[in-house]
Amino acid sequence: MSNLKSLNHHFAIPGHLTFIEGPGGMAVARIQNGLASSDIALQGAHILTFQPKGEEPVIWLSPQAKFAPGKSVRGGVPVCWPWFGNHATEAGFPAHGFARTIEWRVIDSKALPSGATRITFELQKNAAARAQWPHMCHLRNIITVGRELTIELVTQNTGTSPFEITEALHTYFVIGDIDAVQITGLEGCEYLDKVDDFKRKTEPSAVTITSEVDRVYLNTTADCVIHDQKLNRRIRVTKTGSHSAVVWNPWIEKTKQMGDLGENGYRGMVCVESGNAADNVVAVAPGETHTLRAVYSVEKL
Ligand code: BG6
C-alpha cells in the first residue's frame, strides 16, 4: 500500500481529514471541516495553511516557498526543536534543530464533538538527528483545527537521564501590511536584540516594525496580540508552557538574501513565535513530559 493509501486507510475521516500529495510530492494532511481548513505537511509536522471558514487566512505561506525533502518550508508553522536558533556549540548543526525538516508519522486522528479535527504526529528521528541529539525521547505535535488553531508540542523524556531543550512554534502570520500592524503584550519585557549583537534591552511599548526586527523576549507568558488595521482584525496568541516569545520580520535586505520569501513578502507577514529560548531553557527529567501549547484566534475589529 502506498504511504498515502495507508494514511487514508488508517486515519482519514469523512468530512474532516484526507491525505493528499502536496507541493513537491510531499504527503499532506488536508483538514476541511465545518469550522476551518488547514494543510499540514508530514515533513516537519509543518502546518502550511490555516483559515477559519469565512475569514481571511491566518497563517502565511510564502508564494516562493520551496518544497524539498530535508529543507524547511518558508512560512506556515515550522517546529524549532530541540534547539532554537543556532546550536550552542556545533556550527554545523542545522539552525532551529532538525524537527522541522524530517518526517513525522501520524499516530492518531479524531473528529471532536465541537466540530474541530485533531491530528497527532510523532517525530521519527533519523540517524543524523540521533547523532546530533542522542537522548531517549518522544516528541508529539497535536494539532486541533477548529475556529481556533491549537498546537501542542509535547516532549517526553523516555530515558534515564535528564535533558535540556529550547524550542519554538515559529509561526508566520498573515497581515494586511507591515505598516498597519502593531503587536502588544510584550511591553516592559526584556529581550535579546539579534540585529544588535544580542544586546539586552527592554521593550518600551507596543512593537511596530519599520526595519529588520529579530527579538527574543524573555520570561513572558502574556498573550501576544497582532492588531491589524488593514484586515480589521486582531490575532491573539495565547500560550502555556512558554516563557519566551520571538518577533521576527526580515525587512528588505534580508528578504533579498533569503530568496524564498517573495520580493515584497516581508510586508504581508510577521512571525510571532511562542517557545522557550535563550535563558528559558527547559529541563525535562526522566519520565517527565513538557508541553508547549499555543492557541491562535481571530477577533474582528
Ligand atoms: C527567527 C530567528 O526565529 O527565525 C531569526 O530569530 C531567523 O534569526 C528566522 O533569521 C528565520 O530562520 P530560518 O532558519 O527559517 O531562515
Image: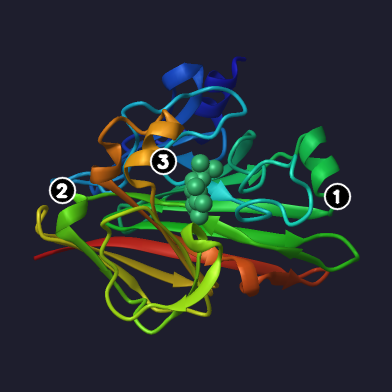
Q: Name the residue tied to disc 3.
A: 254
Label 3 near ligand 1 (CB < 8 Å):
yes
Mark 1 against mark 3, which lies toward the viewer? 3
Q: How far apart, in angstroms, are the residues tagged by discs 2 and 1?
A: 43 Å
Under tag 1, what secondary structure? loop
Mark 3 against mark 2, which lies toward the viewer? 3
Label 1 near ligand 1 (CB < 8 Å):
no
Q: Name the residue tied to disc 1.
A: 134
Q: What's the amino acid at mark 2? A: Glu
Report crowding for label 3: few under 14, some 14 to 19, many 20 or more residues within 10 A (C-alpha).
Answer: few
Percent x, y for residue 92? 75, 39
Q: What's the amino acid at mark 1? A: Pro
Report crowding for label 2: few under 14, some 14 to 19, many 20 or more residues within 10 A (C-alpha).
Answer: few
Percent x, y for residue 198? 56, 65
Q: Nearer the viewer, residue 146 or 274?
A: 274
Q: Name the residue tied to disc 2.
A: 55
Q: Which mark is residue 67?
A: none
